[in-house]
Amino acid sequence: MAPASTLKHQTYLTLNDGNRIPQFGMGVYLVPDGEPTETAVAEALRLGYRHIDTAHAYQNERSVGRAVKASGIDRSDIWITTKLWPSEYGEGATAAAIDKMLERLDTDYIDLLLLHQQVGDYKGAWKDMERAVAAGKVRSIGISNFESANLEDLMAAATIKPSVNQVECHPYYPQDELRERMAPYGTLIESWYPLGHGDAGLLDEPLFAEFGTKYGKTPAQVILRWHIQKGNIIFPKSTNPEHIAANMDIFDFTLTEAEMERVAALANGSRFYNVSLADQEKNLGAWAPAD
């Protein structure tokens, strides 16, 4: 992984395709379409966020696109990530789905396009995603929730190796094994549930309170800072303006190596989302998001 270059309120990582991604962003999972999403994204962009993570399945891409347009910020300065649902996988079907995404987002290109789930015709979809990169419709491509042997299956078929894998990742489940599996391809970890889905047990760990007292930060800010130093790409979700601002206030302190090791000792294998591959294949393919 290339070292992060630091700007005010932000760090950037260089992906395996050479593109530079803002390491910290704003997620809009479960934020309703319309005013809630537009207001939250607008506030984030006003505060200096430059990475917005959405998905077709979130059903709020149009609102993200409107907020980006209304911000007055140059499009090239904002990184938009979105995701294809399994119902859109397959050669031809994926190409059409990408064009619809561009329309919903009202943009000429997508910065990062992911396969949202590890089920369905992901190899056929990947071929169309690679073609979209060649056509300039998409800058970078990656995956989400690929943790089974399907990860290696896709890697073997891919000409362009996934730039990221977006998975559950937090101090209780730091994904170190997955990180090692992807290292040969230069694929980086993006974290959903960076705060353990707001789990009280994680947030109330005495260690984070101790570090928070030392640095004048909340436990949540300490955890988000841990992610940054771990090399994860994160986009905590909030519609609360105070929380949106606080989440980003993590670039004025650094955990020591010894403190990072103490956080590493918290890893216990606990996950907050446990669904077998068989159940993923059975259930995730049975639903299709509306256009």
Image (tube, helix red, strand yellow):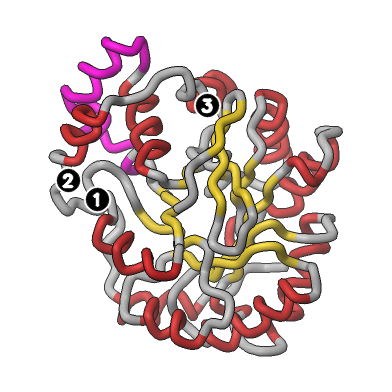
Q: Which of 250 and 43 is in front in this view?
A: 250
> Distance between the Cα atoms at labels 3 and 1?
22 Å
Up-down: is 288 above or below 62?
A: below
> Distance between the Cα atoms at labels 2 and 1?
6 Å
> Which amino acid type is marked by label 3?
Met
Q: What element carries label 3?
A: helix
Q: Name the residue under label 3.
A: 248
Up-down: is 148 above or below 215?
A: below
Q: Does the magenta stretch include residue 213?
A: yes
Q: Which of 137 and 62 is in front in this view?
A: 137
- Dot label at residue 173: 1
- 3 or 2: tag closer to the N-terminus: 3
Is disc 2 surrounded by few (<14), some (14 to 19) or many (20+) residues within 10 Å?
A: some
**Residue at (21, 16) in percent of width and height:** 210
Q: Does the magenta stretch include residue 245?
A: no
Q: Give the range drawn in magenta.
A: 196-217
Look at the numbered discs 2 and 1 and tell me whether their residues touch, using CB distance below 8 Å: yes
